[in-house]
Image: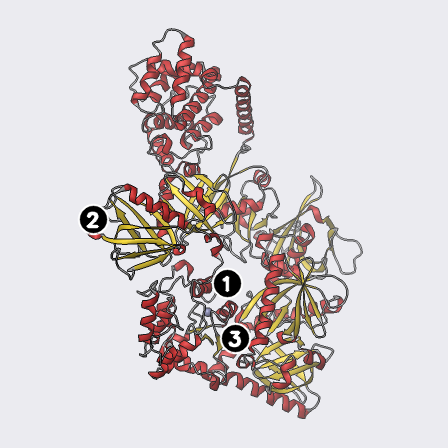
Amino acid sequence: MADNEDALRAMQNCFHSQFSVDEAEYEDIEENRRTSVDEDSIYLGCTLSQSFNPDFHHSPVIKMGWLHKTPPQGTLVFQKRWVMLDAQYLRYFQNEKEVYSKRIIAILSVTKVLNVGGQKFEVVTRNRTFLFRAENNTVREEWVSVLKETIQQQCNSMEKSLMNFSDTCGQRASRVPLISKQGYLEMSGLRSKLYVVICADSVFLYRNAEEHSQGVGITSIEMNLGTVKGTDKRSFNLTTIYRTFSFVAESEQQREQWVEALQACVSHSLSSNAVAQKIWSEEANQRCADCGAPHPDWASVNLCVVLCKCCAGVHRGLGQSVSKVRSLKMDENAWTENQLFLLLGNDKVNLFWAANIPPSEMLCPSSDSEERQRFVTAKYCQGKYRCYHALFGQQEALNKALCNTIQTGDVLETLSLVFCGADVNCYTGDPELPSPVSVAQHYGQTLQVEFLTHNHNTELPGSRTGDHTILEAALPISHTGYLFKTASSTRAVTERKSKGDFSRRWCSLNQGNFSYYESEKSSSQSGQMKMSDVLCLVVNPQGKHGYGHSFELYHDSGRVYLFGEDSPDTVREWIKVIVKALVPPVAEDLVGWSFERVGRLHYTVGQSFHCPCLGWFSLGGSRLLLLLHGEDQVDNIDLRKLQELSVEQEAAAVVLVDRGRRLRLEGDRRPDYQGWLSGIQQGLGRGDGPLDQQQLTETEVPVIVDRCISYITQHGLKSEGIYRRCGVNSKIAALLLSLRHDARQVRLSEGVCQVDNVANVLKRFLREVGEGVFNGHQASLPWLHTTTVSEGRERVSQYKALLHSLPPVNRATLGAVINHLYCVQCFADENQMNMHNLAIVFGPTLFQTDGTDNSAGQVVEELIQNYQDIFNVNAEQLQRQLDMISHVIKAQEEHAEEGTPSPLTICGIYLERKEEGSELLVQISQAVSAEELVCEVLRRGNIPPQQGDYWSCFLVNDNQEMERPLHYQERALAIYFSLGKDCHLVVKRNCYMEAMLICIAAMVDVSRNSMIKFSDEKGQRGKRTFSRRLCVLDGTSLRLYKEVKSTQPERECQVHALKVYYGIKKRLQPPSCWGMTVVCEQAERDKQQWYLCCESKNELIKWLATFMNLQHNSDLCPAASRPDS
Ligand SMILES: [Zn+2]
């Protein structure tokens, strides 16, 4: 008890400051209540400084989120409400930080849930109908189905033990003898009395007794850690860690009774810990088995894990068939499982359930509900992290082992067997004791009996369908024959296996099952796998192992099977039939080529990181073929042409950007992912390979060549002696190295010498690239030989024929280079490089010769001279290109004069803050919005978007003392150009956004007026210049009045002409740190800055929110990042 009191005191102290703010706001709240058409309820404003933590609530939360709700009478004005569902109650709150609900509806009093039009649904109770509207139909469907399910569960199972606590509402109320007192009380601050019900360890508030009988109340107050104290003859305080409720009873005697009943209620809430205390005596049970939160007071009795409320809520959502959730706070007599939990304990059980959790998927107490959902589903529904039993996949052996184990006390082994597939209801072979339960009973193993009983109907991990639509309908193939097989392993086979490592097995593929036997004559198989559990088939390069031809199968369990044979035909035939049984018919095109691996992977497309889909992929060389979920056509990615590839080590995922599409392949702990990853990386293109293995552009020109050419075109065409001057050798070498490493990532920066360095990089690359542009020495000889032909027309047609015989990438590269040289010589007046001069340089470069043979130069000169003819280029097209180049050069020169960046702009944007190394160079066009810029910067910075994170691009001004978040639709480039000296753009979290959104959600009136400290900097230097003004902001303008009574504003500015910055210059000595600078640009010449300073952060947020609301019509942030999306 003493401990609890200390804890209470400490927490009250923590909340003290919060209280004073709340009290200050109380007036506003009352104001809202009087003016708004809403609420027939009562708002008990009590806000937490942090976002809602479901842990404050008694029961595990099944679902929560934002919904719009209509007030009960008439007008269809929707109000945004935070809605939360647990097993017994649906509640809604003013916002997600509120502790006390505006309404609490007993699930048992809900008669039906109805879909109505326009994303709306109704929750109907006997006397009232609540109309909600969801953001979209999907969200609506989720709510409706989860509500219906919850109602069904409540009605059907009537798990009394779970409802005993707080079931005061609804029809069952009369049957539950837990109500210790009920009646009317006055509550200070409210004009009408409330009907208060004390039940078990909670206190429920209703507007009146009718509401109580109807099961629709205002809120519930949980009494654990509460205190009750009489304050006056008739009044008393009920204090929880969040706020104090002051009540007045009708008489002194009544007050005594209330205080007594409430005190009993508090002690009840403390004493119901008996079961929990016992289970916690096993130390491992003092932390939630899933997230590690302390003092978990729930448990899943069939999975044998002790859980916190949040995780228990997710478990409950999986359904009884997966997890049977119980509260530890039940009557001690209702708990028979104590011993089981003491015997096992979270740590031991997690040796099974959580044997293989990648660090990136670990859950922690602060994980959000989505992460929790994903983790719990993966852990128990899919069995993703479990420790596979050695007998996994061998049904008979598993059953047999189960029948033996249940005769012993080893429940952990039983658990491992059952959740790896042993059949709880299998036939033991003994007619006297036919079922495992009867065997366990016979041997007096009561805990085994208990465990088996709880798992009588449990759905086993991996048995849920869902993903499987895309797995369906592989063809019914059968095939048999001998293959050589090594022992399976848990990782990819990297080392060479000699023939001695293989053993001969009779293999059979039939009805989607692949099995192998000691020999053709063996009747019992030595192993089996379902083709639907095979994730991936890999064809090994010839000669990788002792048997010349081999392939690997990657099983869902994480095991890898290697098969081989010397005969290529045998292996080819096996691969053919296995692939047919593996891949659905719609994905047939995936396998009609010489792929290296084929299989399925989870993926997401675009920016979404959630709900990955399952797709089929095959990979070989630089080709990745894919069949995405719901598509019926195989798509093709040329990995050399990828715009980007990034590997997320932590999350084990790889992101490919191809033709503007972003594809994220999800890996997990299984060995097949590593193979996909390295295969993709090898297919990307290598700077040290021949031309056709380079990173390529859409037109099949190596990115290195393309980058250099376009740079020279932009910056070097008028540079005298271009391609002739030599540049700085160390810089050329470094630049070429980085281009070869990853050409796409290299940004060529401007600079006087840079032009020559880039020109030399191009030359050196062409001179050194494997096999050269002409595809090897041999193939280049006919080109050189052509110069001996005397007739000019004849030479041209020979060049044409030779060009035609080049491989596509070589042809495209030669075309790009000659086109470039043609353009360069068009500017010979300025750069002094005519055809002949260029040919002298590029002859030996392209032919990779030493320059003693003049014919190389001669060929190049003729190629430039006859460029249109040989390369079949349309004259108009070429002219357009030259016009374009002239235009770009002209624009460059103009911009060079003005000193502003060019329209093809690379912008330096800082991530998080301006400091060394935080600058990212982002290429943006005029049309790019702030939102797109933010996404690009985050992507480049490898920061995945997260719920509740609001990133904005800030214009930071004046020594970082004031900053303005760009509205997400603002055009970023225009702002970038307008930046003055000392200004820059930073992408960082917008710390006020969430508070502003909440503020707007709760706003009744869109205008605002109150006193504020104001300065316009015109006061005398050194003196404090801030003075009080009445500040009025509405739909038309911002007005400042000297006095409350003034009729004429001292200053006025139209709302649309305002720009609001966070912060005020320190030089002005603002009276608090909650300031903003309003830049008023009503007229070009009349640009004013007003400095407005608030008393508190809260007040500042209200002002900012009002500004934003008025300027952007409450559209503050992109839909995707709103909390309710
Ligand atoms: Zn937990």
Between 450 and 505, the one nearer to me in the picture:
505
Of the two numbered discs 1 and 2 on the same chain, state the one appearing first in sequence.
1
Between 440 and 65, the one nearer to me in the picture:
440
Question: Could you tell me how far apart the alpha carbons at marks 1 and 2 are, in whole angstroms?
Answer: 50 Å
- Where is residue 158 drawn, in percent x and y? 56, 79
Depth check, mark 1 against mark 2: the one in front is 2
Q: Quadrant of the C terminus?
A: bottom right
Q: Are marks 1 and 2 in contact (CB under 8 Å)?
A: no
Q: How many marks?
A: 3
Locate residue 99 relative to residue 345 in the image: left or right: right
Task: Say whether residue 1026 is visible.
Answer: no
Q: What residue appears at the point 46 percent right and 31 percent down from the top-left corner? A: 750
Q: Which residue is mark 3?
A: 11
Q: Which residue is mark 1?
A: 368
Q: Secondary structure at mark 1?
A: loop
Question: Could you tell me how far apart the alpha carbons at marks 2 and 3 are, in whole angstroms?
Answer: 68 Å
Q: What residue appears at the point 60 percent right and 68 percent down from the top-left corner? A: 147
Q: Give the farthest residue toward the front.
A: 521
